[in-house]
Amino acid sequence: MTRRRGDIAETLRQRVLSGIHLGELKHGQRLPSARELAREFGADPRVILAAYRELQIEGLVELRPRSGIFVVAADTLLSGLQRRTHDWMVEVLLEAVGRGIPAPDFPEWLRRSQETLRLRAACIECNDDQVDELSGEVHSTYGLDVSGVDVYTMLGSSSPPKDVRRADLLITTRFHAHEVQPIAIQLGKPWIVAELRMDSFAEVARRLEDGPVYYVVVDPRFADKLGRIFAASPGAANLRVLIHGRDDPDQIPEAAPVYLTRLARERLPERSRLKQIMPQARVFTPETARQIFTFILRANLAAVESPL
Amino acid sequence: MSRRRAEITDLIRQRVFTGLHLGVLTHRGRLPSVRELAREFGANPRVILAAYRALENEGLVELRNRSGAFVAPAGLSMGDPTPRRADWMADVLMEGLRHGMKPGALSQSLEQCFDAVDLHAAVLECNADQLYSVPEELQRDFGIRTTGIEIDSILAGQDAPVELRQVDLLVTTPFHQNEVRSLARRLGMPMVVITMCTDLFTEVGRLLPRELVYFVVTDSRFADKLHRLFGSSTGAANLRTLVLGTHDLNEIPDDAPTYLTRLTRRRLGECTLLQRVLPEARVFSAESARQILSFLSRTNLTAVPSDRM
């Protein structure tokens, strides 16, 4: 139960932080009620409320009796975040000193442990939306150079394409793990099967039971894939996938929940009309994030001659 | 029991690291036997063995059947603690993401904990050994420019010396906290009371009831302080303090546990013929290190515009 609460608190924290960061949430804005979220997460409202309370202690949200839950005002948020982040940074520096790294050297040391080598990843998927989703996340969060590779192009040619051959790391999803693995082995390259955060898919499945849910994608192949992913869900008939450039986004009712892929988000100019755009979740699960970091750090630390 | 094992593991790990650093230990060099350490720590040999095994897993130590424990060859330990370190760093980066900072932003925020202000601290102490070791650690581990000042010289004078007025922070140890606190109040200056890392004292306290323990210091006042410190320990009479330049170090039996202060080490160089030199201990307790880091980072972060955080 507490574990579940921890997971939910983590998801909510992520949503609030990235929502503010992306401009989708504003300070003082009302957040979904515990009852609404209880339905979405399939959890007891008391669990949701407890998760919200955790966030309140951290200074992220404000619970106002009888009127709801709100993102805190900007200045309060900043100082709350700063305090939490500051205390944590002090602990990190303390640990660094304990490991024999002088505290003032640690930031540079941390940087060198990631940036000594220029590492290149090939993100392999079967449609433009997911290739873009993987590549964007790998580049922007982990700082790797990235090339996107279409799995069918890769399988269709007699030898792996240049982008795959010169990559230091291959990244794919479990849909294509069996296709990427033999090539990684053949080329002697490390590969990571990225686990996507499934909470968004689970969330969509739950919303489908309540009514139409819209997806805007760019590549028709991703549209087909979404159809397959939700085929077994009870609300499958409520899934509406629109292909950018082919289908008219005006047909989306204003109040309907809408998911945009990263690629669609980039290309869709009139997103402001859509009220219920779901916040973009971080793409990777913590396990995958850890694998990517570990790959980067090990490669760099081995290259940096004993940084002590 | 496992807590005790963890403590002993930490202690041995630190010894091996600092031993290598100081050149007192070499890669592939022999480490004390399980039996010897069991005696020293007053612990069950199985606990020591378990600690050695943990260090073997970390690639720091090599256990050879029937011939004992050795420092692992260079490639395995100091040169390549990579996996363990990478795992820790991965934790840090993951946690950074949870705080909303991508790796680049994290390095930058950490840098801001040091970059804005060039802090200058004064360490007030009563003897040369501590006036050397405390500033050295402040400077090396925290990057704080530090001046050591004899506390007696200040208390004797009427006005605080000029050099004191130019610093941002006063640092002392619990022995002198009362004098320094009133001074800090008078000067309107923050102060930190450094508590010492107790590893060394615990270890010495454990050895004293059993055998002679030698300290080589450079300042007789630190020798007096040590006698006061261990005055109430069992085996206090076994404490021997020698002052460098006054006493003959040859009177130390080859196999007696011997502690050299940092200043002594510096004056002696790294060549010492003593066999059981206790490794250099970290001076500051974790709590003190945390206080200093907090002070340092707060001072720096409040000096930059808050939107950069």
Image (cartoon, coloured by chain):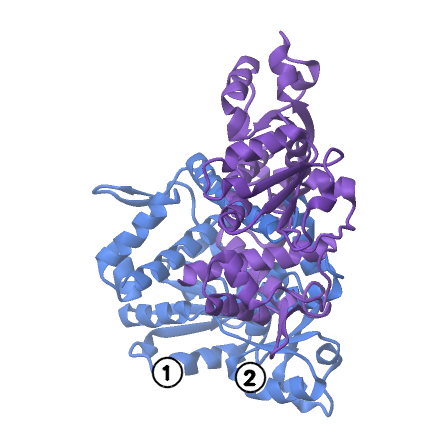
Chain colours: A blue, B purple
Residue at figure coordinates x 55%, y 56% from the top left = B11
| Residue at the spot of label 1 | A231
Instruction: Determine contact: label 1, label 2, CB under 8 Å.
Output: no
Task: State the image coordinates of residue B50 (x, y, percent, origin top left).
Answer: 50, 69
- Of A118 and A253, nearer the camera is A118
Q: Answer with left or right where residue A200 lies relative to residue B105.
A: left
Residue B280's place in the image compared with B172, above or below, is: below
- Residue at disc 2, secondary structure: helix
- Residue at disc 1, secondary structure: loop
Task: State the image coordinates of residue B133 (x, y, percent, origin top left).
Answer: 66, 37
Residue B151 figure quarter: top right
Task: Examine the rendering and report whether any part of residue A114 can be seen.
Answer: yes
Q: Residue furthest bottom?
A: A158
Task: Examine the rendering and report whether any part of residue A280 can be seen.
Answer: no
Q: Inspect the image, locate mark 1, and give the three-letter code of the amino acid beneath it.
A: Ala
| Residue at the spot of label 2 | A177
- Of A85 and A97, nearer the camera is A97
Q: Earlier in the sequence, mark 1 or mark 2?
A: 2
